[in-house]
Image (spheres, grey):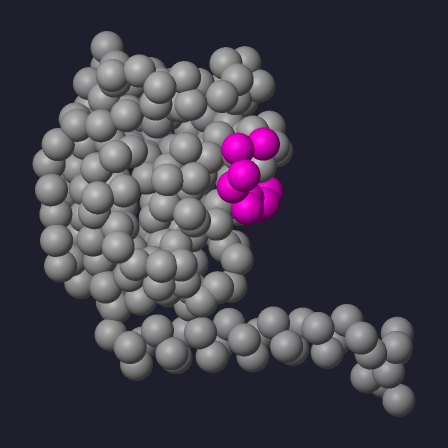
């Protein structure tokens, strides 16, 4: 797993929607590798409801009838125009769910802190699907990628955080993997997130200076 370039998370990646428009929809309408990838996920992911983190312009979220979240306001607008219930948000602070599964499709390679993103999914779901592209420079612009992951790299990210790989697949010039966490860890992390959120809300509702009498 090697770093490619340092910059703010996904800036070039999400700016491409401003530049290129809803390019995933264009690719999905033609016989492309992206179309094969999207249809493969449709065949593979049977859980519901699903959260598509990094949903982009919304093709895969639309196919899965999933909720979507993306850092790019332009991408979220495009997804909504296609009927996807998408919102602007960060991979490091996903919607609370709960969701039967979360999808990170071609997201981790764009992130400066991929393990932090995996950790953020713990209170949201027990089931995580991940796809990452092969390192094929003539297909993928490396200016958009911090990392290149193998399956063993994905395991190295997920296993220390309690995720166990239960399935993997190689195809469409991508590596796919499905991870799950024990129910007890999921419930612990979900309860911890709930308490932290409630504490923040309680502190925000107190009059200024109330803690000092």
x and y percent of residue 79 in the render?
Answer: 53, 34
Taking the magenta stretch, the answer to whether it contains residue 105 is no
Stretch of the chain drawn in magenta: 81-89
Quarter of the view holding residue 49: bottom left
Q: How many labels does the image show?
A: 0
Q: Please indicate whether residue 5 sits to the left or right of residue 209 in the image.
A: left
Residue at left offset 52%, top offset 17%: 21
Residue at left offset 52%, top offset 41%: 84
Work out which quarter of the rendered image holds the C terminus and state it: bottom right
Query: Height in image: 29 above or below 189?
Result: above
x and y percent of residue 65 in the render?
Answer: 42, 47
Work out which quarter of the rendered image holds the N terminus and state it: top left
Residue at left offset 21%, top offset 47%: 44
Query: Height in image: 194 above or below 10?
Result: below
Quarter of the view holding residue 194: bottom right
Q: 97 or 84: nearer the eye?
A: 84
Q: 196 or 173: nearer the eye?
A: 173
Q: Can residue 155 be seen in this view?
A: yes
Q: Is residue 2 visible?
A: no
Residue at left offset 38%, top offset 78%: 187
x and y percent of residue 197 in the render?
Answer: 61, 72
Q: 76 or 133: nearer the eye?
A: 76
Q: Farthest residue to the top: give it.
A: 138
x and y percent of residue 164 in the render?
Answer: 18, 63
Query: Height in image: 124 above or below 175?
Result: below
Quarter of the view holding residue 127: bottom left
Q: Please indicate whether residue 43 sits to the left or right of residue 18 in the image.
A: left
Q: Farthest residue to the bottom: give it.
A: 213
Q: 154 or 43: nearer the eye?
A: 43
Taking the magenta stretch, the answer to whether it contains residue 87 is yes
């Amino acid at each position: 797993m090697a770093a490619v370039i340092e910059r703010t998370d996904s800036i070039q990646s999400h700016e491409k929607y401003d530049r290129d428009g809803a390019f995933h929809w264009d690719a999905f309408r033609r016989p492309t590798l992206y179309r094969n990838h999207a249809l493969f996920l449709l065949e593979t992911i049977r859980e519901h409801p699903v959260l598509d983190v990094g949903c982009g312009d919304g093709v895969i979220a639309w196919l899965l009838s999933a909720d979507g979240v993306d850092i790019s306001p332009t991408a979220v607008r495009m997804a909504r125009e296609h009927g996807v219930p998408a919102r602007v948000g960060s991979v490091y602070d996903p919607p609370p769910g709960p969701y039967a599964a979360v999808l990170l499709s071609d997201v981790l390679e764009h992130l400066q802190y991929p393990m932090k993103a995996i950790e953020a999914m713990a209170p949201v779901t027990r089931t995580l699907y991940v796809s990452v592209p092969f390192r094929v420079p003539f297909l993928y612009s490396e200016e958009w990628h911090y990392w290149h992951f193998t399956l063993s790299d994905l395991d190295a990210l997920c296993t220390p955080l309690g995720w166990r790989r239960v399935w993997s697949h190689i195809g469409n010039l991508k590596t796919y993997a499905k991870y799950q966490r024990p129910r007890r860890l999921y419930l612990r992390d979900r309860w911890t997130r709930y308490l932290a959120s409630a504490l923040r809300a309680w502190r925000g509702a107190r009059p200024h200076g109330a803690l000092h009498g």
